[in-house]
């Protein structure tokens, strides 16, 4: 496919994914005091009890304009297939943050895209949400089986899903390190920003990885705590779904993570979807979304 055809496909796929109306949750709960520290819960639409819980982490290059609302149709899609779903919000970068804490490269003039992520708040929030999840889900979704949790995320949210499953292999002294593996059935990452070295080399999402980590001065130190590609092996079942024609987060990023996992002695499943770009993975109208649901089913049930 030519570059222009790939771009045209991406535009069409993006419009389709974002054309769905927002789906209101059944319940919402805060996991902290900040307005972004909130989780939306969706009950299984068939009313079943004992449903596995899918924790959903949205993408958007860790940038503020993209919140959890754009994956609410996916949350509803999964709920209609018998899952309980927790759609997590977290703090992202914004125009009102002139530079990241401890970094100097993120000073940005007004009128440009917001910075990608907040350090350390983005990671603080995901860790806090995951730690609070069993209690909050049991309270808000009594029919959910919090012993069967699968974490899924798209793009930057795919990165966060992989990271959430790797907190027990974070460096000693990391504030997010867990003493033991988190109690997860598995991870299904959708076109994830899974390897920071390759993603940075490719300039994924306008240099979002460098922005998330605060620029070159802090890249190496922070990547050791944030890059899924070095936080291996996790010992947790992991699957990646990736569109072959993805021009936003190219296939090479997922393949780098899978290769790194193999070198660590761990096998990560990689499902490549031909003729698919970045956004069909979260578009309930696309066949790719059914593939995502099947991958989650294989780990959850």
Image (tube, grey):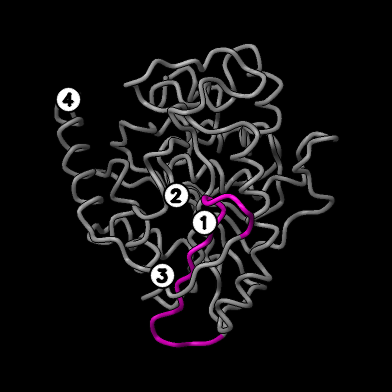
Of marks 3 and 2, the one in the foreground: 3
Disc nearer the start of the sequence (1/4): 4
> Do the residues bearing badges 3 and 1 touch, measured as CB atoms within 8 Å?
no
Disc nearer the start of the sequence (3/4): 4
Q: Which mark is residue 88?
A: 1
Q: CA distance from mark 2 to mark 4?
A: 29 Å
- Please identify the dominant SS of the magenta region: loop
Mark 3 residue element? loop
Circle 1 residues within 10 Å: few <14, some 14–19, many ≥20: many
Tell me how many marks there are: 4
Q: Which residue is mark 3?
A: 25
Q: Residue at x 76, y 38 (%)?
A: 170
Q: CA distance from mark 3 to mark 1?
A: 12 Å
Query: For residue 276, what is the image quadrant?
Result: top left
Q: Residue at x 60, y 66 (%)?
A: 149
Disc nearer the start of the sequence (3/2): 3
Q: Which residue is mark 2?
A: 58
Q: CA distance from mark 2 to mark 1?
A: 7 Å
> Do the residues bearing badges 2 and 1 touch, measured as CB atoms within 8 Å?
yes
């Amino acid at each position: 496919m030519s570059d222009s055809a790939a771009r045209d496909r991406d535009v069409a796929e993006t419009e389709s994914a974002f054309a769905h109306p927002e789906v209101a949750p059944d319940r919402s709960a805060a996991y902290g005091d900040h307005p972004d520290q909130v989780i939306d819960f969706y009950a299984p639409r068939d009313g079943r009890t004992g449903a596995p819980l899918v924790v959903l982490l949205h993408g958007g290059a860790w940038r503020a304009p993209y919140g959890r609302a754009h994956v609410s149709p996916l949350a509803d899609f999964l709920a209609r297939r018998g899952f309980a779903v927790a759609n997590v919000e977290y703090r992202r970068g914004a125009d009102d943050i002139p530079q990241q804490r401890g970094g100097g490269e993120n000073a940005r003039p007004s009128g440009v895209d917001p910075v990608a992520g907040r350090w350390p708040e983005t990671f603080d929030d995901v860790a806090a949400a995951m730690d609070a999840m069993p209690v909050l889900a049991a309270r808000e979704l009594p029919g959910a089986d919090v012993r069967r949790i699968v974490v899924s995320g798209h793009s930057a949210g795919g990165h966060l899903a992989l990271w959430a499953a790797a907190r027990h292999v974070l460096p000693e002294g990391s504030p997010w390190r867990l003493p033991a593996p988190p109690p997860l059935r598995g991870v299904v990452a959708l076109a994830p920003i899974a390897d920071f070295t390759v993603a940075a080399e490719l300039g994924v999402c306008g240099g979002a990885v460098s922005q998330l980590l605060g620029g070159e001065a802090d890249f190496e130190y922070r990547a050791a705590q944030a890059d899924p590609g070095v936080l291996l092996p996790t010992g947790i079942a992991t699957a990646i779904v990736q569109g072959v024609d993805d021009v936003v987060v190219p296939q090479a990023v997922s393949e780098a993570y899978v290769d790194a996992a193999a070198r660590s002695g761990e096998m990560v499943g990689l499902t490549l979807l031909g003729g698919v770009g970045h956004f069909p993975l979260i578009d309930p109208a696309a066949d790719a979304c059914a593939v995502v649901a099947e991958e989650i089913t294989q780990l959850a049930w």
